[in-house]
Image (tube, rainbow, N blue to C red):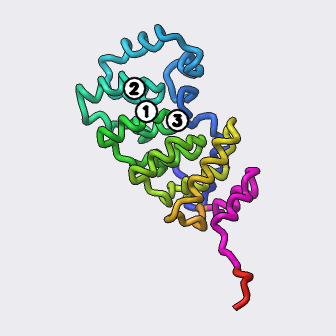
Amino acid sequence: MEFPEDFNQLELLDTHGHLIPRGASSQWTTSQDEELEAGDHSEDWFLEMEESLKDKPTELILWAAENNRRPTVDQVLTADPSLVHCCDEDGYTPLHRAAYGGHVEVVSALLANKSRVNACTIDGWTPLHSACRWSRVSVASCLLQHGAKLNVQTNGGLTPLHLAAAYSSSSKTESVQTLELLLSQRHLTPGLRSNSGETPADVARRSGPHHFLFEMVEDCVSVVPY
């Protein structure tokens, strides 16, 4: 599907957000069983899934990264290190999948195996975009420490800060912490505009309860007399 240059990706997230992968609850799977939360599955279920995918290493590592199966990720990469760079039809790598799932140990393992920290999907999303969209603050911090581009924009002009400002996760604490993490970064460019013309602060005022945090990056006015 092609979009005009000024389309609003945030509106698309509101209307089609249920189709976007978000860890174990992703709807980009092949069966209804896989739409359940990871906590709803037994260890036997995971082992059966791994067995069914053993002859499909690309699918296996993508699935394992999304479902926080660190030993399986390690096993696949030992057999074929190049699979750290594989992706699905939408350009999501194992690192993207681990990032939106909030799986810090898997993220660390993938980065240790030289996963590209700034790999882009067909929509221009990096793993940092994925982490910030779902308020995965620990993952976002890890990615930034490994060189994730802070101000990178998607095809719709969205930065990780736009996505963090637009979404409040089920954990209010993690939403706030994700915004604080990004806003505290020295090289942040907070005024970048999306294709629809909005800055992250604009998005926060419109859609979130944490717009006051953007005072951290506002220009200060000195009141001290000369």
Counting from the top left corner in percent of width and height, residue 173 is at 68, 42
Which is nearer the eye, 183 or 127? 183
**Around disc 1, counting alpha carbons within 10 Å, would you say few (fewer than 14), some (14 to 19), or many (20 or more)?**
some
Report if residue 60 is visible in the image: no
Q: Are marks 1 and 3 in contact (CB under 8 Å)?
A: no
Dot 1 or dot 2: first in sequence order is: 2
Q: Quadrant of residue 194?
A: bottom right
Q: In percent of the image, x 39 and y 38: which residue is there?
A: 108
Residue type indicated by callout 1 = Glu
The tag on residue 70 is 2
The tag on residue 105 is 1
Quadrant holding the C terminus: bottom right
The tag on residue 102 is 3
Q: Are marks 1 and 2 in contact (CB under 8 Å)?
A: yes
Dot 3 or dot 2: first in sequence order is: 2
Which is nearer the eye, 145 or 58? 145
Residue type indicated by callout 2 = Arg
